[in-house]
Image (cartoon, rainbow, N blue to C red):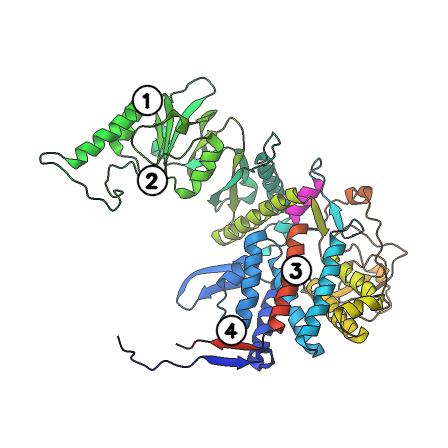
């Protein structure tokens, strides 16, 4: 087929970062992300030009997924951040803002990209080595014998999402429920390869947040009329109900015949034959003392009636999302055939009850060993509920990552300012042998290190959106903020209350300076012993694994963008 138009040549752009459109686009994206950061971040409304659903959010996963990014440089940045979010759920805004700041600050130095890349990678290795060392004083160990640190981790995630519209009491309540649900998914017996259970979030909108609760087991929503005719149920014993789980249609249709040919002999009704097969399957289920039949798709009404007459409860149309938690909870294997059932496919339940929650009605499947639970999540409206659901899923993922690596970093901007102080001190005392290995001068290293630290402090500064004065102390290197309107004759000690993470309060022996102002490099100290941490009511904490990964992704992505020499775009 001939082309209507001649094929256009590819568009080749050299030195893309020197183009004004790229700098402007990067600045706009950076401004959007910075304004969303932290508990007081400004909300963004996402909608397309054709109307439709409007989403209000400040979460990176929703924001980046809803933005229409067209420039290749910004696509590289957003793709890297979205890949990080897909793996760790948390610290998406931190990663994106840090990456934007690094690109902007490194550009101002006007060094060769290869020089900046080598030095920034060395600075990154200093950061990661420090964060993973026992000498690191901006991290704390997470003790699973106490829920205090775990609760602080969950609380920090939820409190940083203003679009959830939670007050302090509601945040505490949801934090407790998320932690309780997570603890229910941990196996009681420790094995070599531990597999965590599942927490299924059940939506109940237009209800009070304080009505949210957790149920061990699974809640499956059913119509009220079906609930009224459910019981009694066939049991093997007083504490055991045998269950069969089907992943194929049991409606009697023949749509799943594959690519083969169906041969129907004269005088044979295909519908009657299929129904006979379903009823034969029902007889086998009854003979095997199955008390509950659950189907991913549709169950034929005649089969439902037959099973009900024999006190077998049927639940259909549960969808594919419920199959895995049901299989995990009951030990049943999804059955994909209507022929010759094997008893090994059956699972079991401890009990089956009914629950009503507002206008919704549920069958409550209670397992013998709780590894799956249901979190009934309520909020004022649909928009706030959507945000809360994402926040709860993020908090659950953070807890899962913390099990693998039981560490947490101090939040509230304190890790960023502390790291900046540490890097300034290390770069100031860097030996000559290290400079030779990197192949750069002392001045080059200092300028790149200063831009690196400035970028870290820029992320911390983004936590404040109300023109507050941002300070850092010269002992611990933590983040402090004070209201902008204060008398000129006041001392900083009269204005500060607590640092960003909440671990330190004002002390007489502390000195403060304005963040990003000139000062002599110093070694950040620590007195964050266990008793001091435990004495603090609510710490602001960040996920150790997610933040370390975010730091690495931000630096590597910034280096990649700086190293771009050409962009080749197909215009056809």
Give the CA distance from mark 3 to mark 1: 58 Å
Q: Nearer the viewer, residue 239 or 491?
A: 239
Q: CA distance from mark 4 to mark 3?
A: 23 Å
Report the residue that reaches farthest toward the left: 266
What x and y, as percent, mark residue 57? Answer: 54, 59
Separation of residues labelled 4 and 2 (CA atoms) = 43 Å
Find disc 2 in the rendering and name its residue: 297
Residue sitting nearer the eye, 64 or 126: 126
Instruction: Name the quadrant containing residue 466.
Output: bottom right
From this viewpoint, is residue 34 visible? no
Q: Is residue 100 left or right of residue 199?
A: right
Query: Which residue is rendered at x = 19% and y = 44% of the image?
Result: 261
Query: Which quadrant of the figure contains the N terminus?
Result: bottom left
Disc 4 crowd, CA 10 A, few/some/many (<14, 14-19, 20+): few
Of the two numbered discs 4 and 3 on the same chain, state the one appearing first in sequence. Answer: 4
Mark earlier in primary sequence (3, 1)? 1
The residue singled out by tag 3 in the image is 552
Is most of the magenta stretch helix, strand or loop?
A: helix
Say whether residue 220 is left or right of residue 29: left
Q: How many marks?
A: 4
Mark 2 / mark 1, whichever is N-terminal: 1
Is residue 10 a member of the stretch shown in magenta? no
Element marked by disc 3:
helix
């Amino acid at each position: 087929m001939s082309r209507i138009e001649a094929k256009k040549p590819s568009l080749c752009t050299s030195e893309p970062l020197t183009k004004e459109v790229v700098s402007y686009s990067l600045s706009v994206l950076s401004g959007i992300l910075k304004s969303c950061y932290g508990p007081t971040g400004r909300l963004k409304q996402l909608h397309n030009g054709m109307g439709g659903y409007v989403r209000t959010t400040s979460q990176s996963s929703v924001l980046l997924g809803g933005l229409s990014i067209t420039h290749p440089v910004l696509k590289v940045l957003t793709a890297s951040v979205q890949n990080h979010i897909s793996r760790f759920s948390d610290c998406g805004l931190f990663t994106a803002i840090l990456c934007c700041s690094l690109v902007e600050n490194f550009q101002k130095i006007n060094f060769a990209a290869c020089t900046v890349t080598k030095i920034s990678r060395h600075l990154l290795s200093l950061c990661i080595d420090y964060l993973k060392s026992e000498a690191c004083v901006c991290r704390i160990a997470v003790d699973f014998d106490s829920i205090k640190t775990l609760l602080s981790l969950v609380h920090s995630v939820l409190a940083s999402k203003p679009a959830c519209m939670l007050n302090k009491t509601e945040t505490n309540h949801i934090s407790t429920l998320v932690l309780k649900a997570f603890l229910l998914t941990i196996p009681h017996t420790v094995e070599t390869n531990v597999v965590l259970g599942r927490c299924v979030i059940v939506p109940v909108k237009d209800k009070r947040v304080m009505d949210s609760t957790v149920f061990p087991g699974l809640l499956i929503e059913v119509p009220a009329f079906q609930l009224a005719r459910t019981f009694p149920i066939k049991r093997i014993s007083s504490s055991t109900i045998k269950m069969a789980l089907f992943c194929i249609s049991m409606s009697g249709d023949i749509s799943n015949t594959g690519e083969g040919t169906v041969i129907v002999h004269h005088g044979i009704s295909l519908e009657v034959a299929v129904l006979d097969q379903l009823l034969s399957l029902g007889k086998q289920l009854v003979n095997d003392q199955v008390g509950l039949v659950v189907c991913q798709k549709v169950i034929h009404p005649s089969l439902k009636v037959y099973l009900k007459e024999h006190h077998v409860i049927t639940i259909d149309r549960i969808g594919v999302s419920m199959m895995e938690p049901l299989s995990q909870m009951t030990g049943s294997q999804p059955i994909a055939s209507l022929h010759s059932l094997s008893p090994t496919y059956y699972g079991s339940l401890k009990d089956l009850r009914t629950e009503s929650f507002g206008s919704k009605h549920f069958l409550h499947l209670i397992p013998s060993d709780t590894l799956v639970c249901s979190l009934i999540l309520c909020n004022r409206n649909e928009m706030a509920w959507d945000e809360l659901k994402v926040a709860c899923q993020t908090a659950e993922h953070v807890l899962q990552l913390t099990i693998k690596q039981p560490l947490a970093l101090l939040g509230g901007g304190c890790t960023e300012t502390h790291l900046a102080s540490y890097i300034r001190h290390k770069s100031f005392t860097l030996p000559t042998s290290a400079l030779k290995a990197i192949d750069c001068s002392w001045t080059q290293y200092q300028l790149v290190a200063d831009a690196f630290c400035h970028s870290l402090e820029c992320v911390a500064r983004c936590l404040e959106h109300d023109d507050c004065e941002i300070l850092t102390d010269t002992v611990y290197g933590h983040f402090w903020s004070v209201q902008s309107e204060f008398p000129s004759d006041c001392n900083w000690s009269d204005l500060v209350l607590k640092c960003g993470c909440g671990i330190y309060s004002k002390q007489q022996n502390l000195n403060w300076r304005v963040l990003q102002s000139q000062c002599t490099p110093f070694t950040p100290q620590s007195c964050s012993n266990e008793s001091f941490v435990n004495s603090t009511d609510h710490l602001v904490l960040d996920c150790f694994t997610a933040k370390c990964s975010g730091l690495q992704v931000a630096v590597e992505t910034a280096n990649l963008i700086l190293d771009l020499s050409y962009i080749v775009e197909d215009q056809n």
